[in-house]
Every structure is written in structure tokens, then in C-alpha cells.
């Protein structure tokens, strides 16, 4: 229960609550106090002093002062106002007011608004230059002469993003923000996440997309800007007229600057933000504190990676193959061709000779329609999506043990956990914003972090314990740790008795997994294994995060099962800040499966073999539906080669480059009688198509995505579709209707309503409940009650109990001795997946223009490799050519090849068709190759402006104490005391 007590505010008795700051209390009471350095997402920074009030007769900063019972608070007295004016005057000495010709004059400049609210008409401290040049790169710029030294950017960089690049050098004669050890931005460790420009209260840190574009009078060249500022100052005499004129201009901007809420189209974190546009021009992305997954946070892709939307390389009309060429066609011709071919193949070879692959980039509504097209119109369950390539094993492991294949809680739970264990997840680069929550919790709150990976990525660098198991051996050490916990009596016996079945059989299955056996197989020491077990035992809550380093193995499902088994044994389900977190890679890979793009399940994971479920869908869709499960992605490729699958409709997936063993996959495409590809760009896969349909990206449609937390979020249309491209849902509906369906959806909300009516775990999902930044985490009851915590009272399994599921280790593939290089692979911060979208960004590509191969110093010395050396890697399945970067992130004969290319360095020229035995997810991580040096000398593929060469400077916050210690600093409250003492002395 919240502790309430009485305080006196400006002579009136009021009720306050314990453990809140004075500023929070004043805001609740709607008492206006300036606060330029304070930001709700950052907390007290204490640099600006503008929030000074009096408490019990003493001047204090209200942002950092905790309110206490009986406090007497004054905010309106003359002396308080005088102290605030002194503080504000110092701010204006650092910031020149030229609002009318400022790109930041959009109603949200906090300095402008404070000057207006405080009725300031002039300043005593003249604005003077800090005599330091403007810093800029292709993403944002910093103008020292506009910087008020509030430190928000530093706080965000150091303790929210935790890249730890920015600081304020308080020792300079005129302090300013610096990067690393006073480096230029592009020679620093800055990852261009955009936090700094997001939280800046003025135009000091600003996105370059805003420069010269936002205002009616801002588009001047640099040399003309100063004269324009002087002209406006001569016209706007006094701050009252400046405020009036600039407010009129700001209001005019509202007519042409559009702000639209959307959800990011890249990874599975589900960042939501407002997009500022002028026509089809993206001015900036502005995340909002109320965004449920990310708050004020973004990564470089979400903040700045949107050039692809307006790329000239977009497909804007249907394309039809003629021989080895493609020609543009009208929609009617393309649809007629699809109708004729689909009907002909279906008539001659049956419904199951066609297959459909949905997209993790498209919306839930579009995934729903794709599987409905396959099942209700064509009559086949041959439908799948790219979760088959990454997350199906994690889902299988959770289905087996706890019944639902989703995250146990939300990102906030991970941040609050006492212990986070990350296994096979390059979280900082694959899920950047989620990783910031772990880095912050560890840095500020003492969260313990354990990382198990074969590569030393950033989270491994920061971990309290980093262990390097032998590739593919995670199940062994997980089982050994679980056994050790049971042997020591550290298991949660009460939880097991009440909530878990199959305990005895499971304990018996662990007999082989001794610490000695694990040490032999995994190369982890017994001491490391014991340390992990003890850490789990000592922590009240443990979260385990895992990703493709676990799932993309021959035993990926079993290793995922072992993770869930460990969590069950230790009672780390059914409570906040604990549980299983399989991190979803794509923006809607969770939703693609949720909404039925799977060969054996309808939306909501309802089995196609369940007669009652199937009858419900048949009644709604008005047709009979097949009961036999269909083919998954992996099986489709085999069926094409075997002659049983003859037509394929694929949307939003570059299967010809992201599937494993792509030489084999591409040769399958060539055997198809008819192949339809639907995409935004002419991808590698499009090259094999008979018809290519122009789809619209997320900015050009409405719908919903479901992130890794099981969180539904709405995206709103930013632009009209380019050219003749269409949202995927409209294209699918057109195809369905040409094939005889009678679909009449006019908006994605109608599709969601239909899906929710058929799917119990989505029963309460509708667009009204998802308005704005509202969100819902499934399961969602019909009344709209959602489930931030997935399991509370029982598990969705027989008798409401979870089940411990015994597993055995599947040894990874073994290769001939000549294939002596283990080729690890995965994601990269700057680019997403194969790079079809992010390479369209000049700024991002300028930082990381091409793929590269990470090589250890040991291997480099042995093979005569240096930065820029070009090598050829050859596996039994193909070869790649790529330039090297020598690094300490990999060890021995292990190399790391990011997946961000569709060229000659594409990882899947090396991979095999070997897959997880339970889900057919390709074993991408089980690759060995031989290496040949092609060119010993060459230019490094990683340019010097890449953040990996930077030198972060960790600190807590802005170090405001260093400001207070300066000889030229006096607390405004003390100055007021001194003045008044002299006046009355």
C-alpha cells in the first residue's frame, strides 16, 4: 500500500505519496516548475537548476528532492522565481534564441517554452560562442553554441543506451559534450542509436534530416544563416515578440509536417515511434516514452534506416518473365496469369501441388490472409513462414514443457531480473534496444549477467561470467547444471510438486550429465558449471535469453527444451522477472506463426487435425478444409526436387539467399512450373520468379505486428503506396478473388476482427484497444484483459501442469579433416539480415559498406592474414569469397561471417540441408570449411569510421559534481540568499 501523508504547498494542505520526488508531486498537482535537464525517462540530472523551489525554507532542486511528511513547499514566492530566473539566464548564455529560423521550432523546444512560460523578456548573461566547431556525421549533428549542457544526451548514452560514448568535459574553459576522448563523431564508439537527439530539449543535438527542412525560413546555406538570424533579431525586438512570431511560424509548420505512429520493421523488439514527414521525405523518427517496448530508445536502423522506402530500386509495377528477362505488366494481366496457372496446376496435379510462404516482415492480418488463401481457396495446408529458419525449435521446446511458445513476460521483466543468462544470442547487435535494458540493469542495479557463446560479443565482454562452450554442446552443460542443482537440493520442490509433471522420469534422464561428462564434452570447467548453478540458486529470479546460436542446430529443439527444463526445476516460471525468453529475430516472426502460417496449425496454434477446430473455421470461411498437415519450408524444397510440388507463392522473404544450402534451393526454384514472388525490391529470389508482384513496406500500410513479448501493436500508414505497389493484404485478396473467393475486406481491422473471432487466445484483440500506443500481450480474453505474465495460475497443458521433458544430446555435424575452420554466423548491428533494406541507406552503408569475415589473431598469424586479406571458404556444399577483419572476438579456428549480404560472401553458399530433427530448422551453425587466401593485401572491409574502432568512456551519468566543483559555479539559491542578505544588511 502506498504511504500517503500531508504536506503544505503554497499555503495549502495537500496529500502526497512516499518515494516520489518533489517535481513528480508538483506535476501531479499541475503546478508548473521549469525543468530543462529533467526527463521522465532519465530521472534527475541536476545540471540546469531551473527547477529550484523552497522546502522548509531551503532552496532545493525539485527534480532530485524526495518529498517527506510535513514538508512546507513554496513555488510561487519572489525569491524562488528569482532563483529560477538566474538558472534560466545561465541557460540562455549557452543557447542563442533564433526560434523563427530554427528547425527545432515545432512547439516542442523546451527552452522556447520555458522562456515563454516564465515571461522572460531579456537576459543578463549574453550568449557567447564556445569556440568549438559543429560536430556532424550523416545521421545527426551537434552545435556546441546551442548546447545548454543539460546532460540529457550523456545520461541517455551512458545509462540508457549504455554505449558510453558521450560525456561533458567539465574541465574545459567552456564545457561541451565530447565523444570518447574528444574524438570526431565518426572516429568514436558512437553507434548512431539516436538517443541523444531524441532527448535533447533544443536544437543542439538534431537529426540531419531536419536541417533546413522543418521550417519555412530554415532552408538557408550555412553562410547565409548568420545574416538571417541577425535579421530576425532586429525584427523580433524582445523575447515577447520573438515568441509570438515564432509561435505563428511553428503553427504554420503543423500544416505540412505530418507525425505518424508506426512500429519498426526490423528486429523483434517491436520499437514504436512517431515518424515526422514532409511529403514523402522522412525528417526524423521520434520515439515516445509511452512506447511499451522501447520507450525513448531506438537503434541505428529504427532511427535512421528508412531510405529504402523511397528508393528508386523499388518495384512499382508487376513484372512478368519472358525468357530470361522481365517486362512490366498491368495488374489485370498479372492476376489473370496467376489465376490460370494456379487453376491449371491444381486441376492437373491437386491442391497439394501448390505451396505458400508467408513473411515475417508483413502484418498479422497479411499472414492470416496468406494461410486462408492456401487453406480455404486452394485447399492445402502447405503454408509456412521464416520462423522455420530460426525460432521453431525454441517454440517446440516451450510447447513440450509449458504449453505456449512465447516469452514468459516482457522486456521490463528481463530488466528487473536478478540474473540474466544469455545463450547463443548476440543480443546487443540482434536486439539492440532490448540489450540496453540488460546493460543498464547490470550497470546501475547490479543485475548479474552470464553469457554462453562461442564468440566474444559486447554482452560477453560485459558479463560477470563469459563461458565458451564447444559449438553445439549447450544441451550438455545445461543438463549438467540442472543435475547439479538437483543433486545439491537447490531445486524448487514446492513449485515442482504443485505445478510440474514427469519429475521422476526427468531426474532419471539426467544421470549421464555429470559435471565430469559436461567438462569433457563442452570444454567448460567444473568450476564454471558450479558457478552458473550457484548463481541460479542464489538469485530470486532468473531469465534465460536465447536465439539462433541455440536453435540453428540439429538438436535445437532439444536444447531449447533443456533451457525450459532448467527454469522449471528452479521455479523460474509463474513470477515476474523470470522465465524463458526466446528472442524473436524479425519484427513479426512471432505474429506470422501466431496467425496460422504454419503447415499444421490454424491461427492461435490450433491443430488442423482437430475436428472441432476445423469445423469452426469451415463454418466461418464457408468451405471444407484439409485435415492433413502440409509441408514446411524445408519439405517444400525437397518436394520440388522430387516433382511433387509444382507452384509456389512466396511473399516478403528472400528464400533464395536466406535458406540453407542455397545452391540446392535455387536449383529447386528452377524446377517449379510456376513461381510467384511478392516483394518490395527485386531480390535474389525474384530472379527465379515467373511473376513478381510489387508490395508496399510497412510505411505504406496499416495493420499490426506482434513482437518478441507477444505484444500486439498497431502501425499507421505514413505514405501512399509508391507507384502501383499495394499492401500485401490487398494483393492476397485480389488473388483470392480471381480464384473465386468473395472476400470484401476494406480495412485490416476487419481481418483482425475475423481472426480474433476464431482464435481464443486473441479473442479480445481489436483495433480500438490498440489505438495509439496502446498494446496487448496475448493471450487476450474477450473482455480485453491481456497477459503481461504468460503463466500465472496454471500452464495450458493437461491438468494445468507443466511437463519436464527428457532430452538427449544430438552431436553436431562432423566434417572431413580438410574442413578445419568452424564458420559461425549471425547478425550485425548496422544491417538487417541479407541487407535488402539497410544497404539502401547511404549513411548506414557508409559505416559498413560490405560483409566481412572475423578472424582470430591466432588464425591470422598462422595463415598470413591481415585486415583486408581476401579469402575463399569452401564447404562440401559451396564456397564464399570475403575480406577479413582480424579481431579478438573470435578464437582459434572459429571465424564469424555476418549474414548481411546476398553477394559472393553469402553464408548460405556454405550451409547444408542438415536440420533440427524435430522442426526442420536448418542447422546454420553447423558448418566447417577450408580456407584459401586469394589476395593477401587489400583494403579493410571495415572503414575507420566504424564504431568498432572507438574507445568508449564508461561513467555513471553526467558527473554533475564536477560542474558544481567549478570555480565559476554558484548554486542559484545561494546567490539569491547572498543578494537578499546584502539588500537587507
Image (cartoon, rainbow, N blue to C red):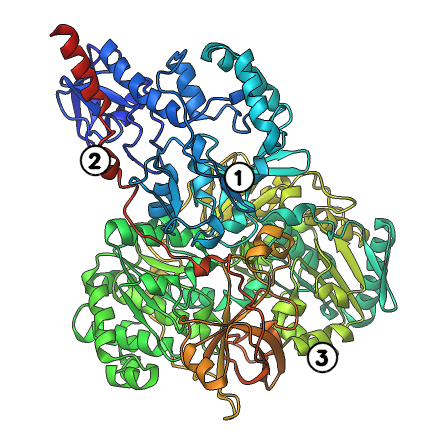
- Which secondary structure, mark 3? helix
Q: Position of residue 749 (x, y in %)?
A: 61, 39
Cα–Cα span, label 2 and label 1: 33 Å
**Which of the marked residues, 2 or 1, is nearer the chain's N terminus?**
1
Whether residue 160 sits left or right of residue 717 in the image: it is left
Note whether residue 225 is visible. yes
Report the quarter where the N terminus lies.
top left
Cα–Cα span, label 3 and label 1: 51 Å
Between 546 and 835, the residue placed more toward the observer is 835
Asked if 275 appears above or below 561 in the picture, the reply is above
Of the two numbered discs 3 and 1 in the rendering, the one whose residue sits closer to the viewer: 1
Residue at position x 86%, y 50% in the image: 330
Residue at mark 3: 641
**Which of the marked residues, 3 or 2, is nearer the chain's N terminus?**
3
Residue at mark 2: 965
Asked if 81 appears above or below 365 in the picture, the reply is above
Of the two numbered discs 2 and 1 in the rendering, the one whose residue sits closer to the viewer: 2
Residue at position x 36%, y 42% in the image: 154
Which numbered circle lies on residue 868?
Answer: none
Which numbered circle lies on residue 207?
Answer: 1
Q: Position of residue 816 (x, y in %)?
A: 52, 92
Whether residue 299 sits left or right of residue 340 in the image: it is left
How crowded pointer 2 is (Cα within 10 Å; few <14, some 14-19, many 20+) is rated as few
Q: Position of residue 931 (x, y in %)?
A: 55, 84
**Which of the marked residues, 3 or 1, is nearer the chain's N terminus?**
1
How crowded pointer 1 is (Cα within 10 Å; few <14, some 14-19, many 20+) is rated as many
Asked if 697 appears above or below 561 in the picture, the reply is above
Amino acid at each position: 500500500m502506498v504511504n500517503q501523508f500531508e504536506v503544505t504547498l503554497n499555503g495549502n494542505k495537500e496529500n502526497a505519496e512516499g518515494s516520489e520526488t518533489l517535481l513528480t508531486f508538483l506535476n501531479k498537482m499541475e503546478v508548473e516548475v521549469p525543468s530543462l535537464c529533467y526527463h521522465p525517462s532519465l530521472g534527475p540530472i541536476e545540471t540546469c537548476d531551473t527547477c529550484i523551489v523552497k522546502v522548509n525554507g531551503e532552496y532545493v532542486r525539485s527534480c532530485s528532492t524526495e518529498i517527506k511528511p510535513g514538508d512546507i513547499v513554496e513555488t510561487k514566492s519572489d525569491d524562488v522565481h528569482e532563483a529560477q530566473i538566474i538558472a534560466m539566464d545561465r541557460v540562455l548564455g549557452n543557447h542563442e534564441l533564433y526560434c523563427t529560423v530554427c528547425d527545432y521550432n515545432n512547439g516542442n523546444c523546451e527552452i522556447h517554452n520555458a522562456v515563454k512560460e516564465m515571461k522572460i523578456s531579456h537576459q543578463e548573461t549574453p550568449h557567447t560562442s564556445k569556440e568549438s566547431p559543429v560536430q556532424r556525421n550523416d545521421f545527426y549533428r551537434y552545435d556546441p553554441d546551442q548546447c545548454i549542457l543539460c546532460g540529457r544526451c550523456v545520461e541517455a548514452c551512458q545509462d540508457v543506451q549504455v554505449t558510453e560514448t558521450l560525456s561533458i568535459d567539465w574541465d574545459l574553459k567552456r564545457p561541451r559534450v565530447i565523444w570518447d576522448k574528444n574524438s570526431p563523431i565518426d572516429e568514436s564508439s558512437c553507434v548512431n542509436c539516436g538517443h541523444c537527439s531524441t532527448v535533447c530539449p533544443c536544437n543542439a543535438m538534431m537529426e540531419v534530416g531536419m536541417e533546413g527542412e522543418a521550417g519555412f525560413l530554415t532552408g538557408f546555406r550555412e553562410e547565409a544563416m548568420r545574416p538571417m538570424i541577425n535579421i530576425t533579431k532586429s525584427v523580433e525586438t524582445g523575447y515577447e515578440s520573438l515568441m509570438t512570431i515564432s509561435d505563428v511560424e511553428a503553427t504554420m509548420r503543423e500544416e505540412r509536417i505530418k507525425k505518424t505512429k508506426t512500429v519498426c520493421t526490423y528486429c523483434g523488439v517491436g520499437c514504436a515511434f512517431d515518424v515526422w514527414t514532409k511529403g514523402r521525405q522522412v525528417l526524423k523518427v521520434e520515439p515516445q516514452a509511452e512506447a511499451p517496448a522501447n520507450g525513448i530508445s531506438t537503434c541505428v536502423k529504427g532511427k535512421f534506416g528508412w531510405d529504402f522506402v523511397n528508393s528508386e530500386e523499388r518495384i512499382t509495377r508487376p513484372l512478368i518473365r519472358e525468357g530470361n528477362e522481365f517486362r512490366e505488366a498491368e495488374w489485370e494481366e498479372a492476376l489473370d496469369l496467376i489465376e490460370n496457372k494456379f487453376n491449371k496446376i491444381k486441376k492437373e496435379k491437386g491442391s497439394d501441388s501448390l505451396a505458400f510462404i508467408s513473411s515475417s516482415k508483413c502484418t498479422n492480418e497479411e499472414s492470416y490472409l496468406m494461410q486462408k488463401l492456401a487453406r480455404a481457396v486452394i485447399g492445402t495446408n502447405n503454408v509456412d513462414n521464416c520462423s522455420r529458419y530460426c525460432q521453431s525449435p525454441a517454440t517446440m521446446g516451450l510447447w513440450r514443457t509449458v504449453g505456449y511458445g512465447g516469452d514468459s513476460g516482457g522486456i521490463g521483466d528481463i530488466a528487473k531480473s536478478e540474473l540474466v543468462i544469455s545463450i547463443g544470442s548476440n543480443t546487443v547487435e540482434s536486439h539492440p534496444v532490448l540489450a540496453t535494458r540488460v546493460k543498464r540493469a547490470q550497470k546501475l542495479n547490479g543485475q548479474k549477467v552470464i553469457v554462453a557463446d562461442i564468440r566474444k560479443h559486447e554482452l560477453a565482454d560485459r558479463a560477470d561470467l563469459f563461458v565458451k562452450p564447444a559449438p553445439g554442446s549447450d544441451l550438455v552443460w545445461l543438463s549438467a547444471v540442472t543435475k547439479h542443482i538437483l543433486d545439491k537440493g537447490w531445486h524448487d520442490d514446492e513449485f515442482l510438486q504443485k505445478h510440474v509433471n514427469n519429475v521422476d522420469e526427468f531426474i532419471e534422464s539426467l544421470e549421464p550429465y555429470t559435471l565430469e561428462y559436461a567438462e569433457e564434452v563442452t570444454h567448460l570447467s567444473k568450476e564454471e558449471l558450479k558457478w552458473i548453478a550457484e548463481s541460479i540458486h542464489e538469485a530470486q529470479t532468473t531469465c534465460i535469453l536465447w536465439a539462433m546460436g541455440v536453435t540453428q542446430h540439429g538438436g535445437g529443439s532439444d536444447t531449447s527444451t533443456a533451457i525450459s527444463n532448467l527454469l522449471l526445476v528452479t521455479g523460474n516460471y509463474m513470477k515476474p522477472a523470470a522465465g524463458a525468453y526466446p528472442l524473436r529475430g524479425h519484427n513479426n516472426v512471432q505474429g506470422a506463426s501466431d496467425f496460422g502460417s504454419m503447415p499444421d496449425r490454424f491461427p492461435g496454434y490450433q491443430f488442423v487435425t482437430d475436428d472441432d477446430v476445423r469445423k469452426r473455421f469451415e463454418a466461418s470461411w464457408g468451405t471444407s478444409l484439409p485435415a492433413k498437415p502440409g509441408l514446411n519450408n524445408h519439405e517444400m524444397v525437397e518436394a520440388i526436387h522430387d516433382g511433387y510440388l509444382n507452384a509456389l507463392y512466396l511473399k516478403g522473404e528472400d528464400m533464395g539467399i536466406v535458406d540453407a544450402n542455397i545452391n540446392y534451393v535455387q536449383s529447386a526454384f528452377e524446377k517449379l512450373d510456376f513461381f510467384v514472388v511478392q516483394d518490395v525490391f527485386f531480390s535474389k529470389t525474384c530472379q527465379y520468379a515467373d511473376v513478381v508482384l510489387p508490395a508496399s513496406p510497412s510505411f505504406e500500410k496499416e495493420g499490426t505486428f506482434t513482437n518478441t513479448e507477444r505484444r500486439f501493436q498497431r502501425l499507421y500508414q505514413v505514405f501512399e503506396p509508391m507507384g502501383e505497389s499495394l499492401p500485401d493484404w490487398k494483393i492476397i485478396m485480389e488473388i483470392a478473388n480471381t480464384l473465386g473467393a468473395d472476400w470484401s475486406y476494406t480495412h485490416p481491422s476487419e481481418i483482425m476482427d475475423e481472426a480474433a473471432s476464431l482464435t481464443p487466445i486473441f479473442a479480445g484483440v481489436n483495433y480500438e484497444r490498440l489505438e495509439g500506443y496502446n498494446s496487448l500481450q496475448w493471450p487476450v480474453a474477450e473482455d480485453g484483459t491481456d497477459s503481461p505474465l504468460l503463466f500465472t495460475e496454471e500452464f495450458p497443458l493437461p491438468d494445468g501442469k507443466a511437463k519436464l521433458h527428457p532430452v538427449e544430446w544430438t552431436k553436431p555435424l562432423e566434417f572431413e579433416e580438410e574442413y578445419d575452420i568452424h564458420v559461425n554466423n549471425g547478425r550485425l548491428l548496422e544491417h538487417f539480415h541479407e541487407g535488402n533494406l539497410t544497404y539502401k541507406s547511404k549513411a548506414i552503408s557508409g559505416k559498413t559498406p560490405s560483409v566481412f569475415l572475423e578472424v582470430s589473431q591466432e588464425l591470422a598469424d598462422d595463415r598470413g592474414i591481415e585486415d583486408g586479406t581476401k579469402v575463399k571458404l569452401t564447404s562440401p556444399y559451396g564456397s564464399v569469397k570475403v575480406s577479413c577483419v582480424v579481431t579478438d572476438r573470435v578464437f582459434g579456428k572459429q571465424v564469424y561471417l555476418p549474414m548481411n549480404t546476398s553477394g559472393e560472401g553469402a553464408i548460405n553458399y556454405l550451409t547444408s540441408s542438415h536440420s533440427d530433427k524435430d522442426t526442420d530448422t536448418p542447422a546454420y551453425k553447423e558448418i566447417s570449411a577450408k580456407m584459401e587466401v586469394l589476395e593477401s593485401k587489400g583494403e579493410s572491409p571495415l572503414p575507420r569510421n566504424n564504431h568498432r574502432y572507438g574507445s568508449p568512456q564508461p561513467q555513471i551519468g553526467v558527473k554533475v559534481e564536477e560542474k558544481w566543483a567549478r570555480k565559476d559555479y554558484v548554486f542559484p539559491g545561494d546567490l539569491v540568499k547572498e543578494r537578499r542578505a546584502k539588500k537587507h544588511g
